[in-house]
Image (cartoon, rainbow, N blue to C red):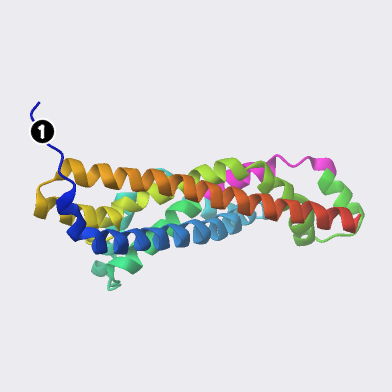
């Protein structure tokens, strides 16, 4: 193999890489926290009495978990205009990321809620707590703490999946790399650099989410003990 690595030409594309990096970070944070909020809400809705809430949540979760994210992006960006709904590429990918992450988080959190022992619920009911008070103070805090590790893993996977948004012209980190690669023909160098950046972002996101979980659940346990 007679290949000489040349990273010099990539210096000219540093502004595009930086811009793409920050856009990737923004998309990841919106997708993660928007998806967590949506997922927790859907998980709670799946525990409500009545057939309709559970049925609607199940349809949504199965649709998100059994179709590729790229297809979901295409449906929103290319499909909805046929129904008269037009959105910018950035808006389309934000909606797709939130919906996709929400579907996975909903199923994870639902498992945590169902793992709560029935005796805890009965104890809350004997104290006169309403259903939503029981959810807020008795069921959700320990359930979220139990499933926090898989939630973090899912959120990191979503961050990596943001690379798919370049398929509809959004210039995230991967989109910037595609432009640099097509103009410099230094494909190996471009994607090695981008891969290293994604690895770094992986560690950064895991550290931020784990630190947030540590602070949230420590405060939650402290408040619980004070209440007792």
- Identify the residue shown where x is 57% and y is 56%: 42
- Give the magenta part as a residue range: 104-119
In the rendered structure, the answer to whether residue 136 lies left or right of residue 178 reads right
In the rendered structure, the answer to whether residue 1 lies left or right of residue 18 reads left
Q: In x, y percent, where is residue 181?
A: 15, 50
Q: Nearer the viewer, residue 52 or 26?
A: 26
Q: Nearer the viewer, residue 46 or 6?
A: 6
- Give the tally of numbered discs: 1
Give the secondary structure at mark 1: loop
Q: Nearer the viewer, residue 22 or 6?
A: 6
Prevailing secondary structure class for the magenta stretch in the rendered image? helix
Quarter placement of the C terminus? bottom right
Q: Is residue 78 visible?
A: no
Q: Residue placed farthest to the front in the image? A: 8
Residue designated by label 1: 3
Q: Is residue 100 visible?
A: yes
- Identify the residue shown where x is 46% and y is 62%: 30
Is 145 magenta? The answer is no
Q: In x, y percent, where is residue 19?
A: 30, 64
- Identify the residue shown where x is 19% and y is 53%: 10
Q: In x, y percent, where is residue 129?
A: 85, 59
In the rendered structure, the answer to whether residue 50 lies left or right of residue 82 reads right
Q: Nearer the viewer, residue 173 or 104?
A: 173
Is 109 magenta? The answer is yes
Give the image quarter of residue 188.
top left
Vertically, is 211 above or below 119?
below
Q: Residues within 10 Å of mark 1 (few under 14, many from 20)?
A: few
Vertically, is 217 above or below 16?
above
Quarter placement of the N terminus? top left
Q: In x, y percent, where is residue 170?
A: 26, 62
Give the image quarter of residue 147.
top right
């Amino acid at each position: 193999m007679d290949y000489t690595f040349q990273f010099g030409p990539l210096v000219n594309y540093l502004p595009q890489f930086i811009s793409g990096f920050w856009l990737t970070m923004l998309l990841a944070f919106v997708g993660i926290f928007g998806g967590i909020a949506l997922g927790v809400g859907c998980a709670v809705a799946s525990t409500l009495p009545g057939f309709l809430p559970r049925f609607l949540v199940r349809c949504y979760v199965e649709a998100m978990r059994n179709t590729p994210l790229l297809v979901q992006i295409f449906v929103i960006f290319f499909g909805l205009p046929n129904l008269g709904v037009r959105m910018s590429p950035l808006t389309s990918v934000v909606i797709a990321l939130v919906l996709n992450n929400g579907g996975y988080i909903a199923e994870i959190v639902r498992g945590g809620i169902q793992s709560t022992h029935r005796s805890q619920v009965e104890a809350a009911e004997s104290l006169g707590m309403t259903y939503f008070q029981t959810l807020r103070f008795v069921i959700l805090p320990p359930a979220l703490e139990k499933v926090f590790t898989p939630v973090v893993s899912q959120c990191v996977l979503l961050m990596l999946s943001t690379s798919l948004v370049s398929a509809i012209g959004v210039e995230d980190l991967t989109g910037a790399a595609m432009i640099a690669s097509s103009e410099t023909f230094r494909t190996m160098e471009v994607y090695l650099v981008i891969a290293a950046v994604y690895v770094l972002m992986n560690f950064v996101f895991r550290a931020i989410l784990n630190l947030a979980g540590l602070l949230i659940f420590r405060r939650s346990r402290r408040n619980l003990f004070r209440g007792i």
